[in-house]
């Protein structure tokens, strides 16, 4: 049984589920002052992301809306919100916890699946272009060595990422 399923079966409310996760421990400290939203560079450029709203929806138990939406994937992890929060809510960490719940349920944007596939296959999330290779030589830099994925594979295996990814790809 997956962790999210175990938490549901144990009768945890969504705020309790988030608070039980690494990074989500401080979610219940939020009193909705709005400092995070006013500090967020992403919220300034798109109405699709508001950290205060994400925390509010999570605290209200709106699990499906939070986990299935795109908002949790828009955070740029600048930590402005977290540095300014008067309650010391670790907002960026809470968003990581929300992302982990979404990932475990296979609810991730396709671009992240593409990144994961490339990382597992090539050791990089994007291919190095011929232009970059050529530019390196004009700058006197040595050619890039091929990435070895063996160490990365061991790390991802030890953290369970590969199993989560494989399960997500089968869905």
Image (cartoon, grey):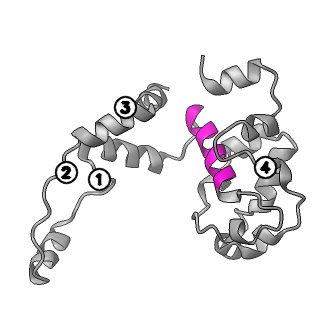
Q: Which residues are magenta?
A: 93-104
Q: Are marks 2 and 1 in contact (CB under 8 Å)?
A: yes
| Residue 80 falls inside the magenta stretch | no
As measured in the structure, the alpha-carbon distance from the residue carrying label 3 to the one carrying label 2 is 17 Å
* Residue 123 shown left or right of residue 32 in the figure: left
| Badge nearest the viewer, 2 or 4 | 4
Whether residue 123 is visible: yes
As measured in the structure, the alpha-carbon distance from the residue carrying label 4 to the one carrying label 1 is 33 Å
Q: Kindly identify the residue that appears in the image at 31 percent across and 46 percent down.
A: 118
Local crowd size for mark 4, using a 10 Å CA cut-off: few (<14), some (14–19), many (≥20) = many
- Residue 34, image quadrant: bottom right
Q: Kindly identify the residue that appears in the image at 82 percent across and 68 percent down.
A: 86
Does label 2 or label 1 sit earlier along the sequence?
1
Does label 3 or label 4 sit earlier along the sequence?
4
| Mark sitting on residue 27 | 4
Q: Kindly identify the residue that appears in the image at 77 percent across and 61 percent down.
A: 88
- The x and y percentages for residue 129 are 20, 65
Q: Which residue is mark 1?
A: 124
Q: Which residue is mark 2?
A: 147
Residue 52 or residue 108, whichever sits in front: 52
- The x and y percentages for residue 94 are 69, 50
Give the secondary structure at mark 3.
helix
Give the secondary structure at mark 4.
helix
Residue 5 or residue 106, whichever sits in front: 5
* Residue 148 shown left or right of residue 66 in the figure: left
Which residue is at the far bottom?
139
């Amino acid at each position: 049984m997956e962790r999210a399923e175990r938490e549901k079966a144990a009768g945890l409310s969504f705020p309790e589920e988030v608070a039980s996760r690494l990074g989500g421990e401080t979610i219940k400290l939020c009193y909705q002052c709005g400092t995070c939203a006013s500090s967020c560079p992403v919220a300034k450029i798109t109405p699709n992301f508001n950290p205060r709203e994400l925390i509010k929806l999570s605290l209200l138990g709106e699990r499906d809306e939070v986990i299935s939406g795109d908002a949790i994937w828009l955070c740029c992890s600048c930590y402005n919100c977290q540095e300014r929060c008067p309650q010391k809510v670790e907002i960026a960490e809470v968003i990581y916890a929300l992302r982990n719940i979404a990932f475990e349920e296979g609810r991730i944007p396709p671009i992240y699946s593409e990144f994961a596939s490339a990382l597992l296959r090539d050791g990089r999330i994007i291919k190095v272009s011929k232009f970059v290779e050529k530019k390196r030589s004009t700058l006197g830099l040595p050619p890039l060595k091929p990435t070895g994925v063996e160490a990365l594979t061991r790390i991802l295996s030890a953290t369970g990422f590969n199993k989560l990814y494989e399960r997500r790809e089968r869905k």
